[in-house]
Image (cartoon, grey):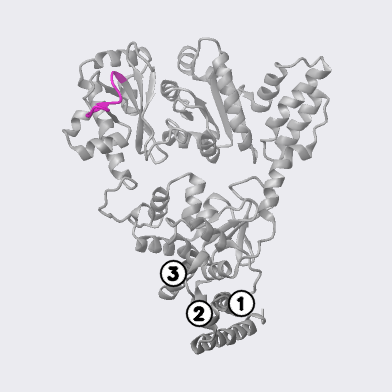
């Protein structure tokens, strides 16, 4: 299994969890016959096309094509890796992740996290005692950060030494390799290792579970870059993580709003003054992953940028990313600070009440969009208004269908005088939906047999597979069919989800996921006979291929009695199979 977790453990986990319960926690489901339905959480829609099957333990969206097991849902909805998703589900049902005792580069997360935790404690100790730490402490005090606040945020110090952290490995080659993979140290081309962070105040970066996965460092004195983050690693993706998100979750939920700033010290200053619903990006522009995480916690995101040219450029990039996430009543706003101010200096100078008033008066995204575009055109001119429509239309195309899009279309018409064609703005999403909602294409007999067996593993007990030669182009598919048949026979309580999860690391995993949701338009009482007919068709294809091959042989072979007997036997079998198939 993925992440080297034992197959038996995954089977046990799947038997303990219910995909309906897992999905319902995130997306309220309603009963619809044997299954449950909801609007899809993975794309914007008004009519529910997202179905969850308790019998198959599988979900599928007929709108966007998303499908999978409970594990897949947790991975996709929460943007987790396989092992993290399994850990989440296992914790929920009281299962302990087995200790495999394996050290593998694709399964060393616990060791990397251990080294990161050790590094955090090391940096904290250095802030108290290392040579040069006095300058770091003086800088923190200058920024209004007390010892208590530094302890709360677990701030540390990386000494001005190339080997202070690397030296803690004491020459242990495996530990040095793991510390390098964790983004803590780097390897010299000439051999040896050196610390990534030197002469810097160090801020731990935690993931959504509160685990330290990386660090950010602010240089003390002169040097570039001023801010440095850990290198990306198996446990750290800076495009997906936000500083202080784990600690801010409760405050975000309480305020139903999150404030996104640009720096660690801005977050610390705001939190210190009671504005706890604050996070920061990690030296990168706002990404869709950032917004997807935030919009799960709140319906309102406020971006806080400097009011200078660079700040407005960064805000415009954030706006372009946010457009596609504005559905279901979500809002985004922009707070531009006075020249020369940042959140840290402003809240210290004017206090939290004044700062909150500024947040409340932040510019709504639609106003920022139209004001910015209007500033690039001359609305007193006809061609200027046409230019506004041309600039705005590609941006509005990103917004999901709904009231906000309707109102912004109306606003564009008011400003430009150009009546927007609604079909142009919705054309892309409509085309996407059309490709997903077309009737299921007819499968080959081999794919049909695999699909039926995945969806209804009990069919394996309705008869043996016919003798099939694993040759030619169908060899891989025939091998899959036989493997699934054997699996279903040996484990009588296996669900669709259980079958599919056995192939998660297989190159055919995505194909099997699609076959697991293919609609055969069959009633339960038709299943067995249809499956038998499909197998008969599959065998008939192979028999016909053998007949063709025999007929293509030389004349001398045609005179052989054995050859004639073999050919007659094949023709007889072909007629018998056709009789079975014609019942379909």
Q: Against 281, is 143 above or below? A: above
- Image position of 310 (left or right of 420): left
Camera-near label (2 vs 1) is 2
Mark 2 burial class by Cα count in 10 Å: few <14, some 14-19, many 20+: few
Give x and y (percent) for residue 425. 74, 37
Quadrant holding the N terminus: bottom left
Choose the circle earlier in sequence order: 2 or 3: 2
Q: Are marks 2 and 3 in contact (CB under 8 Å)?
A: no
Q: Secondary structure at mark 2?
A: loop
| Magenta highlight: main SS | loop
Write down the residue under mark 3. Answer: 483
Residue 307 visible from this viewpoint? no
Q: Against 494, is 172 above or below? A: above
Choose the circle earlier in sequence order: 1 or 3: 3
- Image position of 199 (left or right of 228): left
Residue 386 painted magenta: no
Which segment did they paint magenta?
188-200
Q: Are marks 2 and 1 in contact (CB under 8 Å)?
A: no
Write down the residue under mark 2. Answer: 466
Write down the residue under mark 1. Answer: 530
The residue at the far front in this view is 556
Distance (Cα) linking label 2 and label 3: 14 Å
């Amino acid at each position: 299994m993925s992440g080297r977790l034992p197959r038996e453990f995954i089977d046990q986990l799947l038997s303990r969890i219910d995909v309906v319960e897992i999905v319902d926690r995130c997306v309220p489901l309603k009963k619809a016959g044997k299954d449950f339905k909801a609007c899809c959480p993975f794309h914007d829609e008004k009519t529910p096309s997202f179905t969850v099957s308790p019998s198959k333990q599988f979900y599928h969206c007929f709108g966007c094509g998303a499908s999978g097991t409970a594990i897949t849902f947790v991975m996709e909805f929460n943007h987790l890796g396989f092992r993290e998703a399994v850990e989440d589900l296992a914790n929920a049902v009281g299962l302990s992740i087995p200790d495999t005792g394996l050290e593998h580069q694709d399964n060393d997360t616990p060791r990397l996290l251990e080294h990161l935790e050790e590094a955090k404690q090391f940096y904290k100790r250095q802030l108290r005692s290392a040579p040069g730490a006095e300058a770091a402490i003086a800088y923190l005090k200058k920024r209004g950060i007390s010892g208590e606040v530094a302890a709360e945020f677990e701030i540390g110090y990386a000494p001005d030494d190339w080997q202070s952290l690397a030296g803690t490995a004491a020459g242990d080659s495996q530990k040095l390799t793991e510390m390098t993979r964790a983004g803590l140290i780097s390897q010299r081309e000439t051999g040896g290792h050196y610390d990534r962070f030197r002469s810097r105040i160090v801020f731990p970066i935690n993931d959504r579970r509160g685990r330290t996965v990386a660090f950010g460092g602010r240089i003390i004195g002169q040097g570039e870059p001023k801010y440095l983050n850990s290198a990306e690693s198996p446990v750290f993706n800076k495009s997906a993580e936000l500083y202080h998100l784990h600690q801010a979750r409760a405050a975000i939920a309480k305020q139903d709003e999150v404030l996104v700033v640009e720096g660690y010290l801005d977050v610390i200053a705001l939190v210190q003054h009671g504005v706890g619903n604050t996070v920061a990006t990690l030296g990168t522009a706002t990404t869709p992953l950032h917004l997807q995480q935030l919009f799960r916690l709140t319906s309102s995101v406020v971006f806080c940028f400097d009011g200078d040219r660079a700040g407005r450029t960064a805000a415009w990039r954030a706006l372009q990313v946010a457009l596609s996430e504005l559905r279901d009543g979500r809002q985004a706003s922009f707070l531009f600070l006075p020249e020369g101010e940042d959140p840290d200096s402003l809240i210290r100078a004017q206090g939290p009440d004044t700062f909150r008033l500024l947040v409340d008066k932040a510019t709504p995204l639609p106003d920022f969009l139209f004001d910015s575009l209007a500033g690039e055109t001359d609305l007193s001119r006809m061609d200027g208004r046409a230019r506004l429509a041309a600039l705005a239309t590609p941006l509005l195309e990103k917004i999901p269908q709904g009231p906000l899009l309707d109102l912004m279309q109306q606003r564009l018409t008011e400003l430009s005088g150009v009546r927007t064609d609604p079909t142009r703005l919705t054309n892309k999403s409509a085309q996407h939906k059309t490709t997903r909602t077309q009737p299921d294409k007819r499968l080959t007999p081999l794919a049909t047999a695999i699909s039926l067996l995945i969806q209804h593993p009990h069919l394996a007990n309705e008869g043996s597979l016919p003798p099939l030669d694993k040759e030619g182009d169908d060899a891989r598919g025939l091998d899959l069919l036989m493997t699934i048949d054997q699996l279903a026979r040996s484990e009588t309580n296996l669900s669709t989800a259980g079958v599919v999860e056995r192939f998660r690391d297989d190159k055919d995993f995505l194909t099997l996921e699609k076959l697991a949701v293919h609609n055969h338009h069959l009633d339960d009482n038709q299943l067995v006979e249809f499956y038998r007919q499909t197998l008969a068709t599959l065998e008939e294809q192979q028999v016909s291929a053998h007949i063709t091959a025999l007929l293509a042989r030389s004349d001398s072979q045609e005179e052989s009695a054995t050859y004639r007997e073999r050919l007659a036997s094949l023709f007889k079998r072909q007629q018998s199979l056709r009789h079975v198939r014609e019942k379909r």
